[in-house]
Image (cartoon, coloured by chain):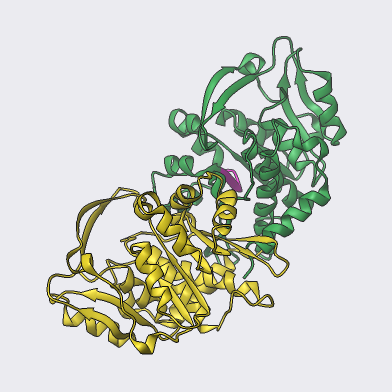
Chain colours: A yellow, B green
Amino acid sequence: MLGGACTYISLSASFFTPVSIVGVVGQDFAEDDVNLLVSKGIDLEGMERVPGKTFFWSGVYSQDMNERTTLQTDLNVFADFAPKLPPSYRGKPYLFLGNIQPALQKNVRGQMNGVRLVGGDTMNYWISDFRPQLLETIREWDFLLINDSEARMLSGQSNLKQAAATIMAMGPKTVIIKRGEYGALLFFKDRHGATRWFAAPGYLLEEVFDPTGAGDCFAGGFMGYLASRDVDLCDPGADHRELHRAVIYGSVMGSFCCEKFGVERFRSLTRDEIDARFQEFQDATEF
Amino acid sequence: MLGGACTYISLSASFFTPVSIVGVVGQDFAEDDVNLLVSKGIDLEGMERVPGKTFFWSGVYSQDMNERTTLQTDLNVFADFAPKLPPSYRGKPYLFLGNIQPALQKNVRGQMNGVRLVGGDTMNYWISDFRPQLLETIREWDFLLINDSEARMLSGQSNLKQAAATIMAMGPKTVIIKRGEYGALLFFKDRHGATRWFAAPGYLLEEVFDPTGAGDCFAGGFMGYLASRDVDLCDPGADHRELHRAVIYGSVMGSFCCEKFGVERFRSLTRDEIDARFQEFQDATEF
């Protein structure tokens, strides 16, 4: 079925802001799937369709849904992907770089003119086998979104506060560490240059149906909210609670993602449901 | 060195409210340790001193401090302990029952006259080997404090929301689930009978020096704060944010506990430091 980081990120962000995507699919990419993206107002000008088959992944989750084993990964058309931004994309103010080879992320960053806020995520494979390229790439990022085990791997620190400080010294002045069912931690510099932290709990679902894509939906909600609010992380006068809210909206979108199989939940999801859950987070954290 | 649930709970609670303890020590119990408790205003009338040696435990932690292995447990004088409340204790409004055989907890509860709020904790051993007694005991409690794996064991549910609902049906209308470094979850009934939840993050320490007693210090902060505010969980008009604050104060006290070996941190700790950390929790969770 339809999947992939770009799909989840863009569907999630589309509830907050207009989204334009860059990616590649094969000739087998279903018209129904194109229609779903179009129905959310997602700009597909940067989506290449080339001869061959679309990227394919399958996996199986552990009983408690906290671990997964990959069954099959076929790169297919993704193997030779060299992202090219349409001219209409190059002046956009917000750029999120999905998990892909760091040199390609850097290349896309280089195609943008005057981007205001850029960030992205990565994974264990790039951290271990492409470390120099990854470090060169994230040096130019405003934020890095990463899960806890990868933050430890990248920084060489087991303590997450120390891990975040080490990563901030690599470039990104804002670090978001995802902890799966336990929520997310945000680290950033306040206007006085001091490091501050914010913690969002994981949303308590009665049943986690399918966690695939939850981290990407977090990314989409986080970035989509910041874009919708015109937030500039480099502005020393910025309200840091906008960053907090972005983390909460990320958590909200990740939680909806888990409620149904694949992208199904996003077919019926409404902004009212999103805001009601944001309010539930408020009630569940204020004291 | 000085340790034990009663020690940690009472030291922690003493920063919020007058505390009277019930327990047993041997003839080897150090005068310095008595003095520490007395210096915090803790009433020792219910502390029995009997011939023999004091309870002793030692253990070793894993590298990441999240697991521990017991090296030695000597029950000593604790083996024959039958708690008897001094008459001056029986009319007190708040009762916290530390981790001990459920029948003894029930017996202590039965010695109280008109207690307003009663709760306590338990452990895997009582859940697996003394289940009927434990169920009979907690049926009379207002709240149960328990860690996540024990909540799953007691309820037979792996999902924590479902686990909490199952435990609430066993008696305690308020359930606090401790998740170690990930913080704590609170479940309670609001004035309309609906179940609500609250999540407190774990405090981010740069270094966890010794987590021994952190859960007990959480209990002391939680109960101590409720007592200091005269909270009645059965009052339908009660402000549920007092419960939220009690969970945060519990988290604050647990975090201080980890900063030094054993009970050391409590020798110098001040209420100002406690309130400053409470404020840090506020800053790190509000959005």
Q: Residue at x 79, y 38 (%)?
A: B19
Residue B158 position within the rendered picture, expressed as x and y whole percent measured from the top left? 39, 48
Specify whether residue A210 is painted magenta.
Answer: no
Residue B144 is inside the magenta segment: yes
Above or below residue A234? Residue B165 is above
Residue at 31%, 62% (x, y): give it.
A212
| Residue A149, visible in the rendered structure | yes
In this rendering, would A28 be left or right of B137?
Answer: left
In the displayed structure image, the side of residue A266 where residue B178 appears, left or right: right
User: Which image quarter holds the N terminus of chain B?
Assistant: top right
| A25 relative position to B175: left or right | left
Depth check, front residue: B54 or A20: A20
Q: Which percent across, then down, holds residue B244?
A: 65, 58
> Residue A278: horizontal and vertical position, in percent?
52, 73
Q: In the figure, B264 relative to B282: above or below?
A: above
Q: Residue at x 38, y 49 (%)?
A: A128
Residue B177 visible to the viewer = no
Q: Is residue B9 above or below residue A90?
A: above
In the displayed orientation, state which residue is furthest to the bottom: A88
Q: How many marks?
A: 0
Image coordinates of residue A202 in percent, x first then y, are 48, 59
Quarter of the C terminus of chain B within the rendering: bottom right
- In this view, the residue in front, A72 or B20, is A72
Magenta residues, as a range? B140-145
Foreground pick, A223 / A63: A223
